[in-house]
Image: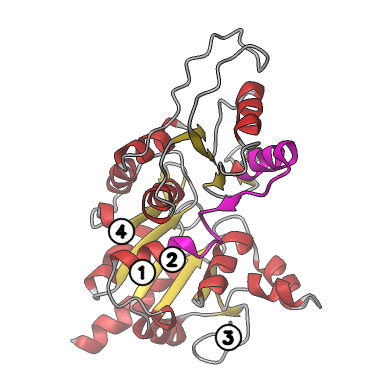
Amino acid sequence: MAGAFGFKGCQKIRGPQLRNLLEAKDFILFDCDGVIWHGENAITGAAKVVSSLIRHGKNVVFVTNNCTRPRENYVTKFCRLGFTDVMLEQIFSSSYCSALYLRDVVKIRGQVFVIGCDGLRRELQQAGIPCVEEADDPSATIYDCALAPDVKAVLVGHDDQMTFLKLAKASCYLRDPDCLFLATDNDPWHPLSSGRILPGSGSLIAALEVASGRKATVIGKPSRFMFECISSQFSGVDPAQCLMIGDRLETDMLFGSNCGLDTMLTLTGVSQIEEAQEYRNSELTTNHNLVPDYVVDTIADFLPAFEELEDQSN
């Protein structure tokens, strides 16, 4: 998608151009990891940016594929890191949106088998969605374990306690063509501060797709459903008036492109501008959907733009 001011993809933007862009947008969508914070450390200036956006009347929402904690835990984390203006209704996680999908879209009538952390289960339970209780003996195998009746969906998210038995059970449930196969997100991996990586939900989904011979429906970014959740809960959401800010080309920028939003890459996370330029110069037109309209080094680059806005209003 071309930027709102006619620039080509990967436009490095600062100062007056950034100020004009922010003035033109009503909704600002932020990814969290790599954009707002790194683990338990806020990106320098990020809390002030969020507070300034809200103070200037912008609708700020957070769209994250991290499904490991329920939304109230996100509010606690935001507050702990200095983001005192963030409310529960501004947070759209892949676990929360998965719960909305099961409750409001497919109107699930039966149990859900969950591969994921406790935070995902809690989000489902708060939406009134019954989950299969795991009560297997540690020595149980797929040959002798119990299989729950009336499983109408398998939902896969990040699970640091993944076992072969969980994979085998999910494969059995998915033999029923009426059993839905859903995924919170398809992120392949996540960077750790030590330079190591953490396998993401996408790696678990890939294993189950091979075992079951089926493809998962992905709820989180880059799927449009997360944007539909935002549109259903905020009035007057116009894609042309939205800006999606993220750090990952294959999820955040593609999400924005899929939803018709202008996109901005911040270089404090996974993807770097060289990768975006490679996609921009690719002969494969599908790769162009991964190219951001704008690039900033960090969202702290917004701060001078706010100072200019405040100077103009004085």
Residue sitting at 71 percent across and 66 percent down? 275
Secondary structure of the residue carrying tag 1 is helix
Q: Nearer the viewer, residue 311 or 290?
A: 290
Question: What's the distance in space between the residues labelled 1 and 3, CA to CA?
Answer: 22 Å
Single out the mark in the foreground, 1 or 4: 1
Image coordinates for residue 287, horizontal then vertical, percent:
72, 71
Q: Which residue is mark 3?
A: 2
Amino acid carrying label 4: it is Gln
Q: CA gap, disc 4 to disc 2?
A: 12 Å
For marks 4 and 2, the one nearer the N-term is: 4
Q: Are marks 2 and 1 in contact (CB under 8 Å)?
A: yes
Residue 87 got which mark? Answer: none
Residue 82 visible here: yes
Residue 17 place in picture, x, y as percent: 46, 86
Spatial distance from mark 2 to mark 3, Cα to Cα?
A: 19 Å
Residue 133, percent from left and from top: 44, 23
CB contact under 8 Å: marks 1 and 4? no
Check disc 1 and give the amino acid type.
Ser
Q: Few, some or many C-alpha atoms within 10 Å of disc 3 (few <14, some 14-19, many ≥20)?
A: some
Give SS at disc 4.
Answer: helix
Q: Quadrant of the N terminus?
A: bottom right
Region of the chain picked out in magenta, as a range: 202-226
- Magenta includes 214? yes
The answer to which of marks 1 and 4 sits earlier in the sequence is 4
Q: Which residue position is annotated with label 1?
A: 231
Mark 2 belongs to which amino acid?
Phe
Cβ atoms under marks 1 and 3 closer than 8 Å:
no
Please say whether residue 185 is one of the residues in the magenta stretch: no
Name the element at disc 3.
loop
Residue 232 in the image, given as x and y percentages of width and height: 33, 66
Q: Earlier in the sequence, mark 1 or mark 3?
A: 3
